[in-house]
Amino acid sequence: MKFLAAAMVAILAGCAAPSGNHSAHVHQPTQAAVDHAAHAPAADPRVLVQFPEMLRTHTLANMRDHLLALAEIQDQLARGAYDKASEIAEQRLGMSSLGLHGAHDVAKFMLQGMQAAGTAMHRSASQFAIVAKDASVTGDLKGSVAALARVSQTCVACHAAYRIQ
């Protein structure tokens, strides 16, 4: 455990180092980073869900695309392009995206709670798409940001409960 904490501190210190001349100034990790590394759980408490390797690779690629879609949505909201944010959400994350992601094939390997979490994410993305479309008329960004937060919260809840292997 202490080795893991020390390794995490070393990694964090390396990540914090500026590019260029590293010998001129060494950055130390913050106390919060040290405390977090020292108290990290020894074992992963999430439920392990077994996927065939090809489907696991496909699913992880889909999840990375979900993260990319969330970043693109945020960028479009920042630009005031609510219709574009809505389109990205529905096509890449919403209920319309299920065929694109092969959801039917993946669902066979998911536990019921994991399926429910995935469905909640897709539904919340479709709900966001509607709210974002409304924002293109009303100019009210607050509702869109709240709806997008609900999408992210469904992702976080699932990833906190499950892991695939």
Image: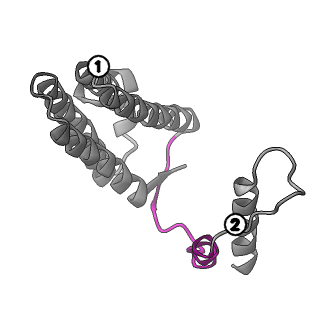
| Mark number displayed over residue 160 | none
Residue 3: percent from left, percent from top: 76, 75
Question: What residue is shown with label 1?
Answer: 84
In-image side of 84 versus 52 (left or right): left
Residue at horizontal 63 percent and vertical 78 percent from the top: 38
Question: What residue is shown with label 2?
Answer: 8
In-image side of 100 versus 140 (left or right): right
* Secondary structure of residue under mark 2: helix
Residue 79: percent from left, percent from top: 33, 25
In-image side of 11 versus 115 (left or right): right
Looking at the image, residue 52 lies above or below residue 7: above
Q: Residues within 10 Å of mark 2 (few under 14, many from 20)?
A: some
* Secondary structure of residue under mark 1: helix
Q: Residues within 10 Å of mark 1 (few under 14, many from 20)?
A: many
Residue 57: percent from left, percent from top: 56, 35
Q: Earlier in the sequence, mark 1 or mark 2?
A: 2
- Quarter of the figure with residue 161: bottom left
Residue at horizontal 51 percent and vertical 38 percent from the top: 60
| Residue 120 lies in the magenta-colored region | no
- The stretch of residues the image draws in magenta is 31-51
Residue at horizontal 36 percent and vertical 39 percent from the top: 108
Q: Amino acid at mark 2?
A: Met
Q: How is the image coloured?
A: one colour
Q: Amino acid at mark 1?
A: Lys
| Residue 43 lies in the magenta-colored region | yes
- Quarter of the figure with residue 26: bottom right
